Amino acid sequence: MIFFKTLSRLIRSACLGLLTVFSVASFAADAPVVGDPVAAQAKVAMCIGCHGIKGYRSSFPEVYSVPMIAGQSQEYLVVALQAYASGERTHPTMLAISKSLSPQDMADLAAYYANLK
Ligand code: HEC
């Protein structure tokens, strides 16, 4: 039993190590930003009020029709956020919010919501 515990701990730290190496490497190579759904948990506070805990319940249904973003494809979500930030999509709140997000924030949030059921 101890053996298996140690083994699984080893595997886990090996995976974490690989992840770290991977993100450092991709940063160095200026590769596309990799979304981190765990990092997003510190950032979703500003989305929850409208997109809901589960990503889709609107807090002001009589004012807004807030789209369901949980379970959407990650690429779609990033493109949507970029479109608000660039002004290609026009929505005052989403414009303000998306402008405050870094490319890493967008990738993280997209990864988070894409994995939310
Ligand atoms: C004040 C309410 C509000 C907040 C806060 C908010 N949103 Fe939105 N969001 C909306 C509304 C309303 C729309 C639909 C806008 C439109 O019609 O284009 C929208 C649209 C979107 C879309 C496009 C969805 C689609 O199907 O095309 C994405 C992606 C999105 N929001 C992500 C986020 C993220 C990520 C956050 C947090 C960083 C956030 N929103 C915070 C209200 C909000």
Image: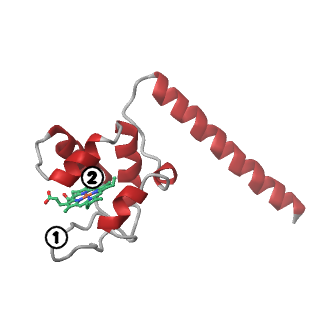
Helix, strand or loop for disc 2 = helix
Residue beneath the point at 59% across and 36% down = 20
Q: Nearer the viewer, residue 108 or 52?
A: 52
Say whether residue 49 is visible. yes
**Residue 73 place in picture, x, y as percent:** 29, 57
Q: In this view, does 3 lie above or below 95?
A: below
Give the side of residue 67 with respect to residue 55, left or right.
left
Q: In this view, does 49 lie above or below 109?
A: below
**Residue 79 place in picture, x, y as percent:** 22, 45
Q: Quadrant of residue 29?
A: top left
Q: In this view, does 15 lie above or below 117?
A: above
Sequence-first tag of 2 and 1: 1
Q: How crowded is mark 1: few (under 14 residues within 10 Å), some or many (20 or more)?
A: some
For the N terminus, give its image quadrant: bottom right
Say whether residue 114 is visible. no
Answer yes or no: disc 1 within 8 Å of ligand 1: yes
Answer yes or no: disc 2 within 8 Å of ligand 1: yes
Q: Residue tagged by mark 1?
A: 65
Residue beneath the point at 87% across and 58% down = 3
As measured in the structure, the alpha-carbon distance from the residue carrying label 2 to the one carrying label 1 is 17 Å
Give the side of residue 115 with respect to residue 22, left or right.
left
**Residue 77 place in picture, x, y as percent:** 27, 52
Residue beneath the point at 42% across and 40% down = 34
Q: Which disc number belongs to residue 77?
A: 2
Give the side of residue 35 with respect to residue 60, left or right.
right
What amino acid is at disc 1? Answer: Ser
Q: Residues within 10 Å of mark 2 (few under 14, many from 20)?
A: many
Residue beneath the point at 40% across and 65% down = 116
